[in-house]
Image (cartoon, rainbow, N blue to C red):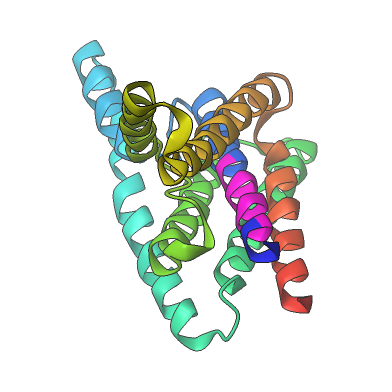
């Protein structure tokens, strides 16, 4: 029971953080998706059609950054005894990105390229979270950065529940677990939209601190 409760908390935290970061960078960093990096294909194509120049091509940079992050996450996992070490580095990158935003802003040297650098650092952090999800699939109820698979499973479960009622305990449990991921991500998106619009990229400190606390908790337990 304690293990299941831990998975519930970790899943909720990671989905909220992914939704938050994805939306913060989209709102405050020229429509860059940091978690759903494939969404940048759409933004890239749209901006090219609109006649954008360098702003569109920057979107493609998210893919090599993401790939390098996932590879790095795999290397960290090979050397670490604690699964959550990958998340510690994710949290540290997010905290440093947020601090850098405030420092550059205070010094009045926060430029467009500084914004893109912070966004790419966030993409890297989300790449680490994606690596964690693949390497340690049993630590969560499902993918925490991309919701399509979770929505698909929830839809299948809902269909079975509508057909057979609530008597299938396994299907009902699966449906509840998918709701945790979907609702968590939605909450994160809403919080990220508000934070990105009114406070900017500096608010990346918040999910970073949350991730570091998650690591520290699991290091002690």
Query: x, y percentage for residue 141?
Result: 49, 51
Query: Does the magenta segment cover residue 8?
Result: yes
> Considering depth in this image, is 183 or 203 the residue closer to the camera?
183
As drawn, is 208 to the left or to the right of 182? Answer: right
As drawn, is 2 to the left or to the right of 143? Answer: right
Q: Quadrant of residue 216?
A: bottom right
Query: Does the magenta segment cover residue 85?
Result: no
> Considering depth in this image, is 161 or 148 the residue closer to the camera?
161
Residue at image point 67% right, 29% down: 200
> Considering depth in this image, is 173 or 21 the residue closer to the camera?
173
Residue at image point 43% right, 56% down: 130
On screen, residue 182 above or below 98 = above
Q: Quadrant of residue 108?
A: top right
Q: Which region shows up in magenta?
A: 5-15
Which residue is situated farthest in the front direction here? 167
Would residue 18 be visible to someone looking at this image? yes
Query: x, y percentage for residue 196?
Result: 64, 26
Location of the C terminus (image quadrant): bottom right
Query: x, y percentage for residue 122?
Result: 53, 48
């Amino acid at each position: 029971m304690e293990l299941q409760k831990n998975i519930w908390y970790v899943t909720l935290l990671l989905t909220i953080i992914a939704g938050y970061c994805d939306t913060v960078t989209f709102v405050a960093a020229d429509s860059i998706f940091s978690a759903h990096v494939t969404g940048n294909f759409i933004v890239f194509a749209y901006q090219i059609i609109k006649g954008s120049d360098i702003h569109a091509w920057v979107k493609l940079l998210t893919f090599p950054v993401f790939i390098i992050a996932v590879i790095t996450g795999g290397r960290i996992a090979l050397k670490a005894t604690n699964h959550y070490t990958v998340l510690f580095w994710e949290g540290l990158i997010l905290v440093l990105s947020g601090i850098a935003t405030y420092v550059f802003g205070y010094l009045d040297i926060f430029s467009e390229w500084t914004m893109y650098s912070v966004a790419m650092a966030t993409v890297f952090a989300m790449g680490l979270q994606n690596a964690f999800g693949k390497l340690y699939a049993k630590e969560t109820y499902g993918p925490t950065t991309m919701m399509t698979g979770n929505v698909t499973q929830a839809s299948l479960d809902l269909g079975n529940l509508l057909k057979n009622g609530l008597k299938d305990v396994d299907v009902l449990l699966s449906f509840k677990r998918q709701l945790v991921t979907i609702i968590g991500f939605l909450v994160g998106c809403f919080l990220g939209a508000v934070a990105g619009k009114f406070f900017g990229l500096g608010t990346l400190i918040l999910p970073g601190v949350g991730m570091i606390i998650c690591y520290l908790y699991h290091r002690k337990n």
